[in-house]
Amino acid sequence: MAAQNAAILYSFLGSCQRNNLNPHAWLSDVLAKLNSSDYEGKFSNLLPNRWKK
């Protein structure tokens, strides 16, 4: 299970790199939105290729 989780995280970080995003900024924003009860957007908009700060 740990290897699968690591693969998912590396995939997200690779997507950030391909889309010229700062991985730290992306991950911080996504985690804040996921933790917020006020977020009403689609979760697919949080993927690196669709994320807008």
Image (tube, rainbow, N blue to C red):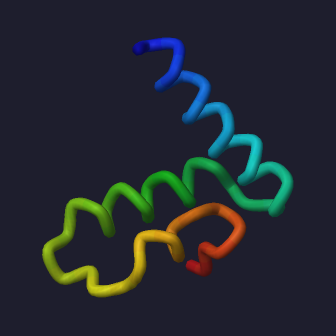
Horizontal arrangement in the rendering, residue 15 relative to residue 51 (left or right): right
Where is residue 37? Give x, y as percent.
14, 74
Which part of the image, by quadrant, shows the C terminus?
A: bottom right
Q: Count how many numbered circles sit on residues in the image.
A: 0
Horizontal arrangement in the rendering, residue 12 relative to residue 17 (left or right): left
Where is residue 52? Give x, y as percent.
61, 80
Is 39 drawn above or below residue 10 in the view shown?
below
Is 49 drawn above or below residue 27 in the view shown?
below
Where is residue 40? Give x, y as percent.
28, 86
Residue plotted at (61% across, 26% down)? 7
Residue plotted at (32% across, 68% down)? 33
Is 22 drawn above or below residue 8 in the view shown?
below
Residue plotted at (37% across, 85% down)? 41
Where is residue 3? Give x, y as percent.
52, 13
Residue plotted at (35% across, 55% down)? 31
Query: Could you say which quadrant of the image residue 34 lies in?
Result: bottom left
Horizontal arrangement in the rendering, residue 39 relative to residue 17 (left or right): left
Which part of the image, by quadrant, shows the N terminus?
A: top left
Is 33 drawn above or below residue 7 in the view shown?
below
Horizontal arrangement in the rendering, residue 21 relative to residue 33 (left or right): right
Query: Could you say which quadrant of the image residue 48 lies in?
Result: bottom right
Q: Quick one: which residue is furthest to the left in this view?
A: 37
Query: Could you say which quadrant of the image residue 36 lies in?
Result: bottom left
